[in-house]
């Protein structure tokens, strides 16, 4: 039985996902989750064109991601979404995932915290993001803060103590 992983990365699918994460996690299928991008076939094509043919790949809506997560596969899959609040759209599926990786998130107007010095991570968070991670962690979702596979691994509980106001 394959494992499902999810990564939060505001860049969605990019070279680091393919060259580092897919190899490290033994990924065979990459699923980008973006409700806006799913409507733009041209941008989807551009985003997916750099992914080698060895990977099954798609950009899907949150609704379709829930359906795909419910399908058990014999290979490992990596789901990628842009922002922490996106997790609310498929929160009922998070416990079935092996790991949720908190990766990169650019600064937004609601950002109040950062652990931008944590192993090269550039992650900005709002009060709502922090609350969401706390709630999911309390529910038993395995949340790991890690930008690249060779960066130090920190659980959300460990990493939240390193947040700094911006």
Image: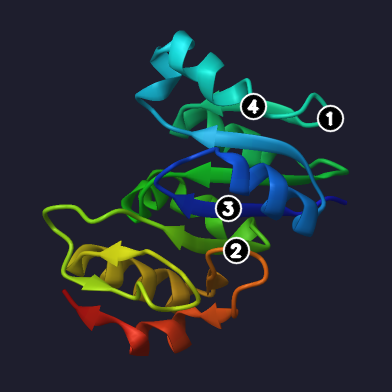
Tell me if label 1 and label 2 are in contact, CB under 8 Å: no
Q: Is residue 101 above or below residue 119?
A: above
Q: CA distance from mark 3 to mark 2?
A: 14 Å
Which percent across, then down, holds residue 163?
30, 82
- Mark 4: which secondary structure? loop
- Mark 1: which secondary structure? loop
Q: Is residue 43 left or right of residue 131?
A: right
User: Which is more N-terminal, label 3 or label 4?
Assistant: 3
Q: Which residue is mark 3?
A: 6
Which mark is in front, 4 or 1? 4
User: Which is more N-terminal, label 4 or label 2?
Assistant: 4
Pick the quarter of the image with the C terminus.
Answer: bottom left
Q: Residue at x 46, y 27 (%)?
A: 61
Q: Which residue is mark 4?
A: 50
Q: Which residue is mark 1?
A: 54
Q: Is residue 151 left or right of residue 123?
A: right
Which percent across, then down, holds residue 85?
32, 52
10 Å crowding of disc 3: few (<14), some (14-19), many (20+): many
User: Which is more N-terminal, label 2 or label 3?
Assistant: 3
Which mark is in front, 1 or 3? 1
Q: CA distance from mark 2 to mark 4?
A: 19 Å
Q: Which residue is mark 2?
A: 148
Q: CA distance from mark 4 to mark 1?
A: 12 Å
Q: How many marks?
A: 4
């Amino acid at each position: 039985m394959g494992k499902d992983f999810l990564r939060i990365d505001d860049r969605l699918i990019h070279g680091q996902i393919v060259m580092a994460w897919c190899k490290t996690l033994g990924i065979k299928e990459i699923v980008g989750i973006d409700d806006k991008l799913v409507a733009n076939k041209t941008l989807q094509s551009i985003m997916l064109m750099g992914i080698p043919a060895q990977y099954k790949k798609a950009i899907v809506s949150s609704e379709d991601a829930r359906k795909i997560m419910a399908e058990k596969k014999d290979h490992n899959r990596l789901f990628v979404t842009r922002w922490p609040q996106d997790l609310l759209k498929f929160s009922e599926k998070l416990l079935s995932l092996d790991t949720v990786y908190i990766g990169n998130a650019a600064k937004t107007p609601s950002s109040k915290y950062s652990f931008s010095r944590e192993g090269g991570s550039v992650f900005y968070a709002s009060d709502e993001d922090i609350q969401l991670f706390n709630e999911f962690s309390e529910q038993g979702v395995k949340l790991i803060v890690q930008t690249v596979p060779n960066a130090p691994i920190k659980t959300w509980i460990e990493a939240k103590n390193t947040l700094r106001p911006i």
